[in-house]
Image (cartoon, rainbow, N blue to C red):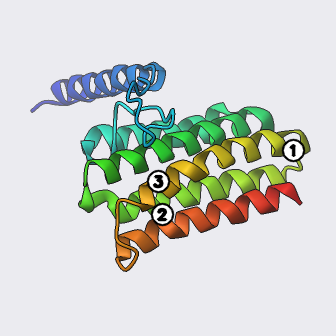
Amino acid sequence: MSCDSLYIVRILNILIFAVFSFVLLFAPVAFATDASPSAMEVPLEKINPDDGFAYLTKRLEEKVKLFLFSLSANSKENFYKELANRRLAELKYVIENDKKGNFEVATIRYSSTVGEWTEFILDEKLDESKGPAVEVLTKHLPVVEKLMTKYDGTTAEWRFVKQDFDYLNIYISKLQN
């Protein structure tokens, strides 16, 4: 291939990636209509951990938005809240759809995101965000607890979800102090 055709291919790849990223970034989240207790008003994510390249792109967009476009501490804190809710939805999806290949990573990703959010609030001394964060995390508790019931208490899967539950309680406690 000549240099001109390689240049054109690169430009097309960049344009396709940009359009795809734009669509994913601003695509609305579909809300659960399931009335069962397990739904608990957890939004469904259009793109989940088993979606391959689309999920990698989603994660890359989240990182870019967090570090480049969240300029103020409040906008970054709001985005962390959004990420915590997304990670809960992904965890719920992985467990309810028995996606064992993504299970461990989803549980770790959830607790890590909630921990990063908590630490950000504390490090930035965003005292006005503590109460709302506690409210959000308190709403996560029954969902995670319900997800634990999908597994026998002697399994590794149960222990991973139990760790998420325990971490939630720790983070809530840190925010309340």
Q: Residues within 10 Å of mark 2 (few under 14, many from 20)?
A: some
Amino acid type of the residue tagged 1 in the rendering: Leu
Q: Above or below — where is 112 with respect to 140?
A: below
Counting residues from the start of the chain, the first of labels 2 and 3 encountered is 2
The residue carrying mark 2 is 108
Counting residues from the start of the chain, the first of labels 1 and 2 encountered is 2
Residue 117 position within the rendered picture, expressed as x and y whole percent measured from the top left = 68, 50
Real-space CA distance between mark 3 and mark 1, rounded to the nearest whole angstrom:
31 Å
Residue 146 marker: 3
Mark toward the viewer: 2 or 3: 3
Instruction: Give the residue drawn at x 40%, y 32%.
Output: 44
Q: Above or below — where is 102 with respect to 62?
A: below
Residue 24 position within the rendered picture, expressed as x and y whole percent measured from the top left = 40, 25
Residue 175 marker: none
CB of mark 1 within 8 Å of CB of mark 2?
A: no
- Mark 3, secondary structure of its residue: helix
Amino acid type of the residue tagged 2 in the rendering: Ile
The residue carrying mark 1 is 126
Quadrant placement of the C terminus = bottom right
Real-space CA distance between mark 1 and mark 2, rounded to the nearest whole angstrom:
25 Å
Q: Residues within 10 Å of mark 1 (few under 14, many from 20)?
A: few
The residue lying furthest to the left in this view is 1
- Mark 1, secondary structure of its residue: loop
Amino acid type of the residue tagged 3 in the rendering: Lys
The residue lying furthest to the bottom in this view is 154
Residue 8 position within the rendered picture, expressed as x and y whole percent measured from the top left = 23, 22
Q: Above or below — where is 32 with respect to 100?
A: above
Counting residues from the start of the chain, the first of labels 3 and 1 encountered is 1
